[in-house]
Amino acid sequence: MKLEICNYSGYKIYPGHGKRVVKIDGKVHIYLNSKCQRSADMRRNPRRVTWTVLYRRKHKKGAAEQEIKKRTRRTVKFQRAITGATWNEILAKRNQQPEFRKAQRQDAINAAKQAKKVKAQQKKVTQPTAVKAGKPVKKPEKIQKTVPKTGPKKGTQR
Amino acid sequence: MNNFVRLLPTTIDFIVHRSFSITAPLYDLQKVSRVHVVDNSKLALDGNVYKRMPRIIHCYKRNDNLTRTRLTAGLGDKVLLAIKGQMKKAIIVGCKQRVRKPNVPQFDSNNVVLIDDDGNPVGTRILAPIPAFFRTRGDLAKIAAIATAFV
């Protein structure tokens, strides 16, 4: 059984009660009883009629309890792991000290520089005639000059 | 008007020791009842604007209790209308009279849908809501088929 709601008063209409009226414009109004119907016919605005739900809603009567209920609802932050890292790993990463991070960064930079050094020396061995723009590189055959064979300066190659 | 008439017995009661009963308005649909056609057929559109409102001139309802002159028709009954100088059959689709049956609504105007002699509706659409029991009654199924809204 479908419980209707009175168009005028806002009360529930149980089966066996109420009256349904179709106005000339085709709108259907459902009234709980003749009190509601007659008030509507008299063109009384339900928002001004004290006992209707519309009035109570407009003037916020009896809504204090509902507000208290609303305030206690709060979202709970839930910490959990992801498929790439367990919760402990995430925590460890989060709790790293800034000095530790800096030291790590420095190590990474040093390691990268070393790698570059090695790479450049390898290049020198395989391509001895390669000339860097603006920097004359001594060929290893011409060792008549006693110019020290200097490796690539630190910081020139980027 | 009705309120004034209802006052009469009480005011003149002590003068004339006779009270007369007054019934509430009945809203029965019978001969000469004016009616609103809710079709989208041409005859309906013209008939609603014509100098005279469409009227019932005969009710095809089997009613042994009432005399021939007092035949009344209600929701779902077939009637004969006079529209725009012509005679046309129609079915009552909305009634101002309050029917004390469950789930049957009361309308604010007496609505009617034109049909031909076979029972097929003349228009293609009905512009007002129709009571839901039209769907279940076999003889009203053709009207329910062209309806746009049910109540």
Image (spheres, coloured by chain):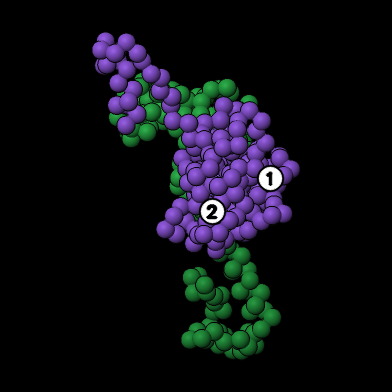
Q: Is residue A102 visible?
A: yes
Task: Specify few, some or many for label 1: CA neighbours under 10 Å numbering under 14, 14-19, or 20 or more.
Answer: some
Q: Is residue B44 left or right of residue B11?
A: right
Q: Residue at x 58, y 56 (%)?
A: B87
Subunit under mark 1: B
The chain in green: A
Looking at this view, is B148 or B18 the one in front? B18
- Judging by the rendered image, the residue that carries numbered circle 1 is B140
Tag 2, which secondary structure?
Answer: strand
Q: Is residue A94 above or below residue B124?
A: above
Q: Colour of chain B?
A: purple
- Which image quarter: residue B4? top left
Q: Position of residue B1 (x, y in %)?
A: 32, 31
Q: Are marks 2 and 1 in contact (CB under 8 Å)?
A: no
Say which label, 2 or 1, has the lower sequence index.
2
- The numbered mark at residue B82 is 2
